[in-house]
Amino acid sequence: MNETRPPKTIATINFKGGVGKTTVTWCLGDLISTYGNSNVLLFDLDAQMSLTQSITLNEDGSLFRKFSDWSERSEQRGKTIFKAIEAYTGKPGFDFGINYDFVYQITDRYHFVPSVEDLYWLELGVIDREKMQGFIRDILGKVTWSRNVPDYHYALFDCPPSFTLLSYSVLSVCDLILIPVNPDFYAVRGVPLILNTLRLRIEPFPIPKIAVFMNKAKPYAGGMTKESRFYWSQVERVCAQAADKAALKVKCLDTPIYDRVAIKRAVTTGGVPPEFVNDFKNLWKGITEFLNE
Ligand SMILES: Nc1ncnc2c1ncn2[C@@H]1O[C@H](COP(=O)(O)OP(=O)(O)OP(=O)(O)O)[C@@H](O)[C@H]1O
Ligand SMILES: [Mg+2]
């Protein structure tokens, strides 16, 4: 890139657990760094560390040596995301240098900022919400201007299934909120709840664009089963209502990710499984079109 610009930021969120936030975020990052020639920086903001742990584990469950060595060094040198938060909320002036002790290189183009256990302590009220609001914006600013890491086209954030200080910080500055839903009744009940909560929590800051799509859609004859289509039509209906009522920019992306077991190994084995590549390419096309609208 000739021109230094902050990355486009996308945060994946749903207050429901297990809908596929982590899996989808990981696969999207892999897809756009592999097929889209983009530099991607992925953040694990979940103190449960499920993404970080998946990367740490080999197929046989042993620690992935390269990552565990890196992670030890990152701790020793005080370059974890928790140390960055301490530097941000502590003394005035944000003194925290970005380099490859902060950023782990999964591949040439796919880079990662892992979660650390200390993130649990963040939620105990030691740090106040207003102090954290600008953290993600400012750390991305540092990443953008750092000469030690490349220019990233996209920053992706895997958020926990709850509203934390870090989700508050990312959701109030990101370009797009991505909401995966599953084909079940919770999607229909849960989506209006999420949209309303987002509005209440993020205001007075502007609410980013919001894209909803179906993950774990049940496949049938080249499309979805009748049941999955039913739930999706209900999601579209409630999204339209909620968007109208709360004046939000919400788009339902008609590009599902299907329910197939191969995806369960996507993180531990590396890339998006071949049978998922088209699903993710279609989803990404919808996301970028919406981002550019
Ligand atoms: N399209 C899919 N097809 C089949 N299984 C899937 C699919 N997407 C996700 N899964 C599986 O569903 C489970 C939950 O996925 P994941 O951990 O990504 O959800 P999550 O929303 O991040 O959960 P949490 O709320 O705990 O962070 C995992 O076992 C994952 O492998
Ligand atoms: Mg998760």
Image (tube, grey):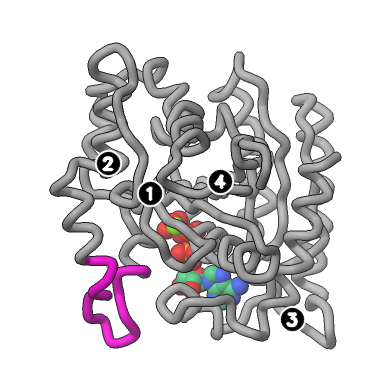
How far separated are the C-alphas under marks 2 and 4? Answer: 26 Å
Q: Residues within 10 Å of mark 4 (few under 14, many from 20)?
A: many
Residue type beneath disc 4: Asp
Judge depth for marks 2 and 3 and give the one in front: 2
Q: Which residues are magenta?
A: 55-68
On residue 46, the disc is 1
- Does the beta carbon at disc 1 come under 8 Å from ligand 2? yes
> Which is nearer the N-term, disc 2 or disc 3?
2
Mark 2 element type: helix
The image shows residue 85 at horizontal and vertical percentages of 30, 30
On residue 219, the disc is 3
> Which is nearer the N-term, disc 2 or disc 1?
1
C-beta proximity under 8 Å, tags 3 and 4:
no
Q: Which residue is mark 2?
A: 119
The image shows residue 105 at horizontal and vertical percentages of 41, 61
> Which is nearer the N-term, disc 3 or disc 4?
4
Q: Quadrant of residue 90?
A: top left
Judge depth for marks 1 and 3 and give the one in front: 1
Q: Which residue is mark 4?
A: 151
